[in-house]
Image (spheres, rainbow, N blue to C red):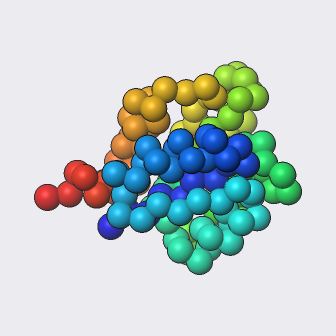
């Protein structure tokens, strides 16, 4: 069973991503800020977290680092979404332990591909891929 947590303070993007990943996972959780995302991640132990970088309070990078430092979340994949610029995202996201990143605006097919790649690297599959 796949659980995906989506965190973004832009409620339109949050709704778009949540709606898009719902068919891929048995459970989709949502958060609109970093602290809420980390609380939910620690409580629910999602298979994957899709994090916006720029959020009020804790940034997505800080949430990603906290996830990486939490042994209980060792198997959780993390994808960073951001509009801060491709080069900065490419250089910074891996420093915080992100498994992948995508720059806003992004194509939903690219998001699907990245989700599948990150889960495959972590030995996981989406619910629609299980037999």
Quadrant occupied by the N terminus: bottom left
Left or right? Give the position of 119 relative to 69. Answer: left
Q: Residue at x 49, y 26 (%)?
A: 107
Quadrant occupied by the C terminus: bottom left
Left or right? Give the position of 52 relative to 16. Answer: right
Residue 22 seen in render: yes
Whole-percent x, y for residue 45 in the image:
52, 71
Left or right? Give the position of 118 relative to 84. Answer: left
Q: Residue at x 59, y 59 (%)?
A: 30
Q: Residue at x 58, y 36 (%)?
A: 101
Left or right? Give the position of 54 relative to 18. Answer: right
Q: Residue furthest right?
A: 57
Residue sitting nearer the eye, 107 or 130: 107
Residue 97 seen in render: no
Whole-percent x, y for residue 10 in the image:
71, 43
Q: Residue furthest bottom?
A: 43
Compared to residue 71, the image places residue 103 above or below, namely above
Q: Residue at x 34, y 51 (%)?
A: 23
Whole-percent x, y for residue 28 in the image:
47, 60
Compared to residue 55, the image places residue 109 above or below, namely above
Whole-percent x, y for residue 90 in the image:
65, 29
């Amino acid at each position: 069973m796949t659980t995906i947590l989506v965190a973004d303070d832009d409620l339109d993007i949050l709704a778009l991503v949540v709606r898009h990943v719902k068919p891929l996972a048995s459970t989709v959780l949502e958060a609109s800020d970093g602290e809420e995302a980390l609380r939910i991640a620690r409580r629910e132990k999602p298979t994957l977290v899709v994090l916006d970088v720029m959020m009020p309070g804790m940034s997505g990078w800080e949430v990603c680092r906290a996830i990486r430092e939490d042994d209980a979340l060792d198997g959780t994949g993390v994808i960073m979404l951001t509009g801060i610029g491709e080069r900065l995202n490419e250089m910074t996201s891996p420093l915080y332990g992100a498994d992948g990143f995508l720059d806003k605006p992004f194509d939903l097919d690219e998001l699907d591909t990245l989700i599948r790649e990150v889960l495959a690297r972590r030995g996981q599959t989406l619910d629609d891929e299980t037999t």
